[in-house]
Amino acid sequence: MLELLAKNWAWVLVRGIFTLVFGALAVFLPIGTANAVVILFGAYAIVDGVIAIAMATRRSYGRGVMLVIGILGVIAGLISIFWPAITALVLLYIIAFWAIITGLGYIVKGFGLTRDAGGRWLFVLSGLAALILGIWLLLNPRDGAVALIVTIGFFAIIWGFLTIFTSIRLRRLSIELDERRDITDI
């Protein structure tokens, strides 16, 4: 596997550069990046929905379920493309409610731990952090959306740099492997 990656180090580099550019765009243009991601999701959902509908026409069993999945995918895609702000807001609310439910679950789980006092408080504190995040996102959806995109951007920048550094290491490994092959061919 490592040899295969070493042979394709340039693709790893390209991936790292694209990740770095996406991260920079997310940090410096968070609203535009959010809209672009929502629109790309919309395009994906439409294509996926059409494929599911086509698959439904070719099946003898499970046709109804596949047809419903396809229709819902096309509808979700169209909503995402024509109303990206609403789609982003709905996603933000899903993340907010997920954080609140997860936070409450961790708090309950933390208080339920009886034998591990240190672990108990780590669960409770992480639950409180998730709960606060969820409530903050509900109360400040615009700021929350921007904060989430910027945070994703910073992670993408770090990931991009790590991927670029990995590609450099893979290139060196590729050169070493080529040199070893040259020596064994002699």
Image (cartoon, helix red, strand yellow):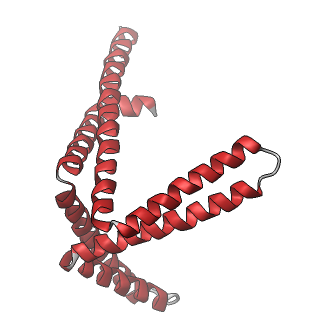
> Quarter of the image holding residue 77?
bottom left
Between 168 and 141, the one nearer to me in the picture: 141
Q: How many marks?
A: 0
Name the quarter where the C terminus is drawn.
top left
**Residue sitting at 60 percent across and 64 percent down?**
104
Relative side of 97 to 84, left or right: right
* Image coords of residue 155 (percent x, y): 35, 43
Residue toward you, 170 or 26:
26
Estimate the x, y position of residue 36 in percent, counting from the top left.
Answer: 20, 62
Q: Is residue 43 found left or right of 126 in the rendered image? A: left
In which quadrant of the rendered view does residue 3 lie? top left
How far across and how far down the image is residue 132, in percent? 48, 59
Residue 67 drawn at (x, y percent): 41, 88
* Vertical side of 69 occupied by 179: above or below: above
Q: Looking at the rendering, which quadrant does residue 71 occupy?
A: bottom left
Residue drawn 25% across the image and 33% down it: 10
Question: Which residue is at 51% across, 57% downward?
Answer: 130
Q: Residue at x 24, y 71 (%)?
A: 43
Asked if 51 appears above or below 184 in the picture, the reply is below
Please say if 94 is above or below 146. Answer: below
Looking at this view, name the residue that lies furthest to the right.
Answer: 115
Left or right: 36 in relation to 8: left
- Is residue 90 at all visible to an observer of this figure? yes
Q: Please say if 124 is above or below 117.
A: below
Tell me if I can see residue 8 in this picture. no
